[in-house]
Amino acid sequence: MTQRLHIVGGGMAGSEAAWQAAEAGIPVVIHEMRPKVETFAHRTGDLAEMVCSNSFRSDDHEQNAVGLLHWEMLQAGGLVMRQAYTHRLPAGGALAVDRDAFSAGVTQVLRDHPNVSVSDEEITELPEDGQWIFATGPLTSSALGAAIARETGADALAFFDAIAPIVYFDSIDMDVAWLQSRYDKGETEEERKAYINCPMTKPQYEAFIDALLAADKTAFHEGETAGYFDGCLPIEVMAERGRETLRHGPMKPIGLTNSHKPEEKAYAVVQLRRDNALGTLYNIVGFQTKMKYGAQTEVFRMIPGLEEAKFARLGGIHRNTFLNSPTLLDAQMRLRSKPNIRFAGQITGVEGYVESSAMGLAAGRMAAAEILGRPLPEIPQDTAHGALIHHITGGAEAKTFQPMNVNFGLFRPVDGLKGGRRGRKDRYKAYTDRAKAEWTGWLATQEVPA
Ligand SMILES: Cc1cc2nc3c(=O)[nH]c(=O)nc-3n(C[C@H](O)[C@H](O)[C@H](O)COP(=O)(O)OP(=O)(O)OC[C@H]3O[C@@H](n4cnc5c(N)ncnc54)[C@H](O)[C@@H]3O)c2cc1C
């Protein structure tokens, strides 16, 4: 009988790993502690729950490294990407989804799979034998975190992350706000009107910044230092970096025309993005925050159009756990000291839903190949998956290791291309063309002959 693969954590990475291994014929048990044991951010007992934004980011597979990961996962029959496309919402060039329908879809496919079973228990130790993938994410339970720290001899690293609030659509004043994607981006009318925009005059913006700076914030515990996802800085931290920072970041007014007052140019604009297929919920884009709840409602209601806003969820801050993978994991994502254990997902030091799912895909295929005794050729470094794996398992500087989004900086240069801004489009296209060819070749090595 084929050996069983145990996967701890049924989030983005664990779900994808389970799917890949199950499709390869391996019996898989997913150990997911929710809903028995909860985390700070998850709300349901579903697999692959999206804890904050409902976006898988850019879907441009020619000019964007995240879009390239989408493409690679789709080619590999990835469950997360397939379900994302099935439950896609209009969002300009981004791949945004109805979060509940998406996780329900992943959950159903896995629960219906004859090779998959799901057990709702918390795993608190690193087992001595059997084949295991630990994909317990940034909110790994504390008992397991302690077991990992005991085994690795190092404290699991931690940094802080914040989430953005969600507003009920029917509490937004659409006589003030209007629907439009930046630069009217999108192929359909729905796409071109995917965002709600709230305009601010200069005095309103200045008052808003003052309120942000003065608001009560969650304090860090003694001994904890604050570090954040670079792409996910709390707005008040951005405001502290300079009064204009937000106007050049999430509140930039460019590419937008107020349909109520086309002649008036807004000084700043707050954007909200649809959060569910029904269109009843909208999240405030880029407004992750560590302000205290009372302060949040007060400050966010200063935004024109949100004076009467009702919040389905307020923002918040949490601890994020990840391994020092360059020292602890081998190129197969196995723990060097216990090679029967692989890690996958955000805990390996990648960052984001897409990257985490991609690491689940890789770990699932690696574990399946090991169980089946079929050597798996190394994932080519010039693919998006390979670039990330190479980074976390050795390419990154271990001393300063921090979670990483996929980006073209992780790719080896393509010879003979111009540097600088002018050559950028050609360069990115060359990276993605090369990656696609390499990924296609790698997938072909695993095709079972008919
Ligand atoms: C609050 C917050 C906001 C975020 N916002 C974004 C965002 O907007 N966009 C983005 O791309 N990424 C965001 N991230 C990162 C996001 O969590 C990851 O990108 C992605 O969900 C990680 O996938 P994962 O599979 O590694 O972990 P998760 O999806 O978190 O899955 C881990 C699973 O393991 C389970 N688990 C934990 N410990 C145990 C245990 N001991 N036994 C059994 N099960 C266990 C958990 O219940 C969970 O279901 C955010 C993370 C957090 C925490």
Image (spheres, rainbow, N blue to C red):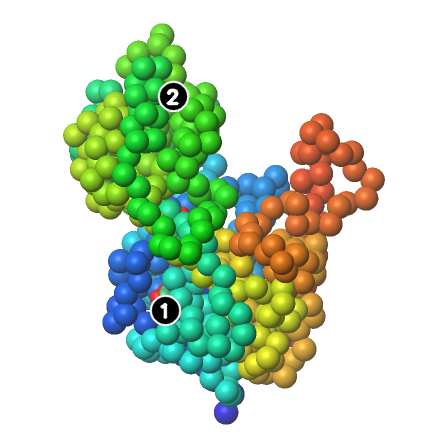
The residue sitting at the front extreme is: 222
Q: Would you say the beta carbon of the disc 2 residue lies within 8 angstroms of ligand 1?
A: no
x then y, percent, for residue 18: 46, 71
Mark 1 is surrounded, within 10 Å at the Cα level, by few (under 14), some (14 to 19) or many (20 or more) other residues, namely: some
Badge 1 marks a residue whose secondary structure is loop
Q: Which residue is mark 1?
A: 141
Q: Amino acid at mark 1?
A: Ser
Q: Amino acid at mark 2?
A: Ala
For discs 1 and 2, the disc positioned in front in the rendered view: 1
Q: Earlier in the sequence, mark 1 or mark 2?
A: 1
345 and 297: which one is in front?
297
173 and 40: which one is in front?
40
Above or below, 436 relative to 367 = above
Q: Would you say the beta carbon of the disc 1 residue lies within 8 angstroms of ligand 1?
A: yes
User: Mark 1 to mark 2: distance in Å?
Assistant: 40 Å
Residue at (29, 28) in percent of width and height = 211
Badge 2 marks a residue whose secondary structure is strand
Residue at (45, 54) in percent of width and height = 159
x then y, percent, for residue 63: 61, 39
Above or below, 419 relative to 27 = above
Q: Is residue 234 visible?
A: yes
x then y, percent, for residue 225: 45, 51
Residue 366 picture quarter: bottom right
Which disc number belongs to residue 40? none
Is residue 312 left or right of 130 when viewed as pictured?
A: left
95 and 165: which one is in front?
165
x then y, percent, for residue 234: 39, 40
